[in-house]
Image (cartoon, coloured by chain):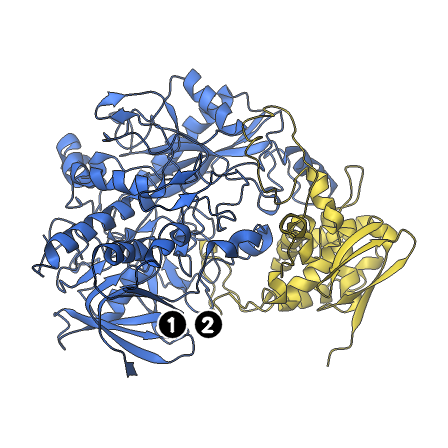
Amino acid sequence: MRRRHFLTLSAASLGGVLVYSLDRKSFLLGAKDKRLRVPLCFFTEEEALIVAAATSRIFPTDQSGPGAREAGVVIYIDRQLAGPYGSDRYRYTQGPFEDGPPELGYQGKPTPREIYRGGIKNLKGFDRLANAEQDARLQQIESSRFFSFLRQHTIEGMFSDPIHGGNVDMIGWQLIGFPGPRMSNFDEIDKHFGEAFRPKPISLQQVTNAVVGPGEDE
Amino acid sequence: MKTLPPVDVVIVGGGWAGLLMAKELGARTSLSVVVLERGGARKTENYSTDMDELDYAIRMHMMQDLSQETVTFRHSSQQRALPLRQHGAFLPGSGIGGAGEHWNGVSPRMFPDCFELLTSSTEKYGVNRLPQNHALLDWGVKYDELEPYYTLAEKLLGICGKAGNLRGRKSEDGNIFEGWRSSEFPMPPNKIPYFSALVRDAAKSLGYHPYPIPSATPSRAYVNPDGVARSACVYCGYCERFGCMIGAKAQPSNLLLPVIQRHKNVSIRTGASVRRVVPEAENKKGKARGVKYVDAKGQEFFQPADLVFLASWTFNNARLLLLSGMGQPYDPKTGEGTLGRNLTHQVAIPAATLFMEKPMNLFMGAGAAGIRVGDFDGDVFDHSNLPFFRGGALEALITGHRPIGNFGIVPQSVKATWGSEWKQAALHYYDRAAAIHFYGEHLAYKSNYVDLDPVYKDSLGDPLLRLTLNWQDNERRMAEFATAKAVEIGRAMGAKDITPFPGLRDYDATRYQSTHVQGGAIMGASPDRSVVNSYLQHRLATNLFVLGASAFPQNSSANPTLTLLALVLRTADALIDRYLKHPGPLA
């Protein structure tokens, strides 16, 4: 039995107001000063801190707005790795495994879980480095599959529906002006030419008024 | 293995082709019909909560489960093929409706000369100017014969558009280069999003002829000849890779399924994975006796039937015939054998990615709401000084930009791919970048084909289908030409920056192109070059029909669905009017 791990976060670092679907229930926390303990599904706390630090260098919090830290990207990745994606449930994984030209795509055997475990091992102490040192470490692994996962999953965690654990409070969607799954643009599609039309974001659960089970809980 | 009570008709695959045939037979005959679909059941209500980019567009919830079966791939027959372990260049569907559920609905007709490509190209250019190694063929059916069925298919789906050639009367509001049509589109064109309108205006200013894309996303409420009603498309931006959450987009599940369910003589079994067509005689030259399948629990069945239809998408149609030993596999060395030849995949490229000054509200869109530019398509332009044959359509279509798939598209001058500099550029360009795509014809070549892989197996232990496929100079030069034209239009639009397509090299199975993979069980006029005749009837086993784009001898710039529906409707007529009275070869 896996020892239960938690990621302890200060709510202020997550943007203050949180909409979270912990254990499949939605929480709304107006918790500016509180500390929050998020149960982890795959990572250990040490691993989660490293991934949180790395993803926040990929999508930093800076003068252009909030980043991976506020969006809870590490929570998103934790849940994806715990779910069917993490174990390659839908990938063709029969052997023999052989190298091929890049146009044939990834031919390796390791699953996303294994690639993360291996990659994190090489980043021991990463979360305690200064920003510049962290960037230098990431530059060294830029061409690895682990890094391309980190980058892709950071974008996913920033901009997927909040049911998946990231994009907390739709902070990623607010950042880019994406309104979420809007039911109708019939009256607007041929208007607003040349000007930004930015309806307030809404999540899938808000739109459908239904409890939607995310794929990672399958 | 359990032998089931015989039925008149068994149809393998519950997508567009299979369910359309089931609907026609259900409505017009009293034959007992069983549809075997290996995926799950589906209905419109399932889609009311599917507008989740991650699960549907990134994790591909509607696509074939590759852990069970994929294809292997190599660029030439000298190489060893490896499995495509994750989705990439094309997206085969699964479940009722198949890929017809998650399509975009782009529904043009093919040019009349596409159906006689070998004859028309040879007459016009002579044998010596055709690309070396080509395997061009005529289809065995002419456009004029198919025209009434195109019209029927357009009415069935409620295709939106504007005629450019109404019985020879040209209109620049439509595609003036299209083949003649006997009637106006059933529905007016969709609304045109901002980016598409910019491309349209720039193309016009250059003297080109843009036209609204024929689309299966209804511009207003529509009731088809079967009495099936659909509401207007609301441009939510969740067509491709999604089922329509309001049932507006034409899909087998909302157009065909409700009609089939009115007819007691048709039943559908889901979770039924067909493994073999069973021939009558041991020498495998006789008729089909039925099919063998495995249900979701792993139990094996033999379903006897008088008529067998394979309608299980391009790959699986060819694979089932190969696994069943029905027909002679194609040998690229000798050119003998017909089964597996003429594998093609539409030449689909983002010809030019444009970075505009103003935001474009790209989240709004629909699978087929936009424009195409027809001046470089087919053989409508002068090729005398060009180093390639045929052409394709430039397309400005906003299917709805969703953020995971579209964040991070920045001009080439931005070198960073992560960190603050990248983030700032990506935020700025997020709603300012969109591409003019190109959809070009892919000629057939002797070296592009499918057969069975000698190494890799599916989850049941059967060999995977092996694709041997690569681009030739004709496609590379065509792509280069199209890229230059797209850049020209982008400049006329005042784009701040343009990233041209870098060029086609070896076929890239990791880049999504389209799901318009065709061939393998092709139709044709000549028995020694085709697997099925022009009625999609098997050359050897005359009670076996192979429906779908597996029958297309070469790939057009027109997306395949409308053409394959027209061919299925033509087959249904011939079957009901002629075959059922006098079984035997229809052509």
Query: Circle 1: is it few (<14), some (14-19), or many (20+) Cα within 10 Å?
Result: many
Give the number of callouts.
Answer: 2
Disc 2 and disc 1 on one polypeptide chain: no
Q: Residue A97: in sight, yes or no?
A: yes
Q: Is residue A120 left or right of residue B496?
A: right
Q: Is residue B183 above or below residue B79?
A: above
- The residue depicted at 36 percent of the width and 48 percent of the height is B516
Name the kind of residue labelled 2 in the image: Gln
Check the rendered structure and report the hue given to chain B.
blue
Q: Residue A120: image x %, image y %?
A: 72, 64
Label 2 element class:
loop
Q: Residue B205: image x %, image y %?
A: 43, 16
Between residue B346 and residue B296, name the one nearer to us. B296
* Chain letter of the yellow region: A
Q: Residue B553: in sight, yes or no?
A: no
- The residue depicted at 33 percent of the width and 27 percent of the height is B175
Between residue B205 and residue B167, name the one nearer to us. B167
Task: Give the quadrant of the N terminus of chain B.
Answer: bottom left
- Disc 1 target residue: B457
Quarter of the image for residue A177 reads: top right
Between residue B348 and residue B574, name the one nearer to us. B574
Q: Furthest-bottom residue in view? A: B1
- Disc 2 target residue: A94
Q: Chain of mark 1?
A: B
Name the kind of residue labelled 1 in the image: Lys
Q: Is residue B338 left or right of residue A32?
A: left
Label 1 element class:
strand
Question: Is the Cβ of the residue at disc 2 closer than 8 Å to that at disc 1?
Answer: yes
Q: CA distance from mark 2 to mark 1?
A: 8 Å
Q: Residue B431: image x %, image y %?
A: 62, 34
- The residue depicted at 12 percent of the width and 63 percent of the height is B540
